[in-house]
Structures are given as structure tokens and as C-alpha cells.
Image (cartoon, rainbow, N blue to C red):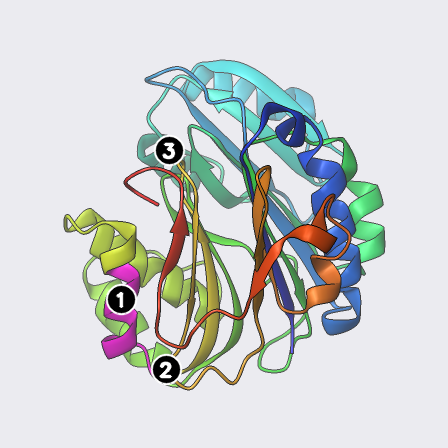
Amino acid sequence: MCGIVGVYSKSDRFSAELGTHLAAMLAEMSHRGPDSAGVAVYRDPVAAGQAKVSLRAEDGIDREALTEALDRGLGLERLETQGDSFALATVHAEPAAAEAWIGAELPGLQILGAGRQIEIYKDAVHPDEFIARFDVGDLSGSHALGHTRMATESRVTAAGSHPFSTGRDLCLVHNGSLSNHNRLRDELAREGTVFRTANDSEVAAAYLTRRIAGGEGLEAALESCLENLDGFYTFAVGTADGFAVLRDPIACKPAVMAETEEWVAMASEYRALAVLPGAAAARVWEPEPGVVYSWGGESA
């Protein structure tokens, strides 16, 4: 079933309160996905030549050891830990180089995502517990995606939770199911993509990453999904500049969108939009099947 949300700020005031609104939206989707929850928030871009890397360790993070390793291997600018298992590291390396080094030298860490702006938090707990554990309401930012998961096709794990990030500052949340993801996984793996889970949504994210790396903009990459991804899906995709939404041509998975002068948002159900300020006066519509909706810069 699953619930997805996305919100894009148009004002400084809303950006400062983004976490409050994201938390409220995510809580409204808890009935659709009680197994796990996750968010991707875009904020506080780091300098050129640096990367933010979101990390998780199943057996817990040794902050002192991680600090020493990252500083030695990449040059550590900042390390923030969240509880026992999560860390956000800012390092002096490009995102791809940082991911490659961590993957090779610190194999006990799960890399959730990397980029100049993106921060990813996710865990296999009820959304209400997730919101409290990660202080989601305290986050600020320009835009964000969120997901609550009801696992119907794979085990309930933190790694298998959404969002999935497979390229610099790109992430995806998905409600639905793909039927040709195994074939696509094999094809992408032969081209060098490293998959971290068996989730079909990670394949969709990797597919978009490949298309964008080949020179397409996000809208064109999403439009190509209509020809190359079989199944039923609603995608919300984030980039450094904004976010986009796509439903498959059948559009059997629910989605609704709304827009005011301060924000644009989408969710699996209207109840997650009704909690936003000014929702009663917002323009509200159901996204059309097979149509890409996007907000932000050129890459969004």
C-alpha cells in the first residue's frame, strides 16, 4: 500500500518550518505504511568539492572510530550522529568519490545517499516513532520527500525503506510495484550500478540516475519511464533543485496535489495535504496519468 508525500517551499518562512509540515504530512500517512518510514530533506548545501553522506550501521556507530576513519580517508568537515545507528558526514570529496571510498574501506556502513544538499533518514519503525526519533519537526529546508511503507514484497528492514538515492542529490519514493525490475536490475548492474537492496524502487531510482547521467533532464528521464518501466506506480522524485511527480498510464495508485503561494505538495491522500497552512484555499487536483509535474530549476 504505502504512503508518499512531497513538499516544495516557495517562501523563506515555509522553508524554516518545513520539518514541522513534513512531520505532520508523514503522520497522516502512517495508516498506509506502519512498517517503516523515511524522509529526504534538501537543505544547507555544502561547498564545491565537499559532500554530505547519510550513513547507517546495523550494529551501531562508533563515533570516535568513524571520525578518525573519515578524517584520514576523505578529510572530515563535520559529523553529526543521530541515536546509535545513524550519522551525517560532511567530507572533503565529491559525492561519488566519498561513496566509493566508504563502500571499500568501511563495509559495515550502509550508505543511504550522498550529495551537496540531500540528507536521508529512514528506519524500520512506525512513522510516529520515526518522527520522534529523528526530530523531523525540527528540520528546515527547501523541499523534502517522505514515505511510509507497508512491506508486501520484501522483508521489513531499514535498508529496504524509502527514500532510495542512487545519484548525487537524486532520490525517489514510490507507491506501487514494478514487474520488470529484475531485468532492469541485471542491465543496470552490467553497466556498473551497485544495488544495496532487493527493492524494485531502488531499480527505478537507478534507472533515472542512468538516464540523467546520459544527458537527459529529469522530466525527459521520467517520461522515458512510461516506455521502459512496466507495472503500476506513483513516483515522487527529488533533485537538488526541486521535485517531480509521475503516475503510470493506468494510475491505479492514488495521488493528489495542491499549490498555494507558499508551497506545492503531493501526497497519496488529501488528508496529508489538509494539515498544511492555507490548504483550505489551495488549488487542488489529481495528477493526470502519464504526465510529469515538476517544480524547481532545470534539473527538476
Amino acid type at image mark 2? Pro
Q: Quadrant of the C terminus?
A: top left
Query: Which secondary structure lies at badge 3?
Result: helix
Q: Residue at x 34, y 56 (%)?
A: 194
Residue pointed to by mark 3: 101
Query: Which secondary structure lies at badge 2?
Result: loop
Q: Pick whichever of labels 1 and 2 is earlier in the sequence.
A: 1
Q: Residue at x 44, y 63 (%)?
A: 202
Q: Is residue 228 left or right of residue 162?
A: left
Q: Quadrant of the N terminus?
A: bottom right
Work out whether residue 72 can be spotted. Answer: yes
Q: Is residue 8 left or right of residue 134?
A: left
When asked about the image quadrant of residue 160, the answer is bottom right
- Magenta stretch: give its range: 221-230
Residue pointed to by mark 2: 249
When asked about the image quadrant of residue 285, the answer is bottom right
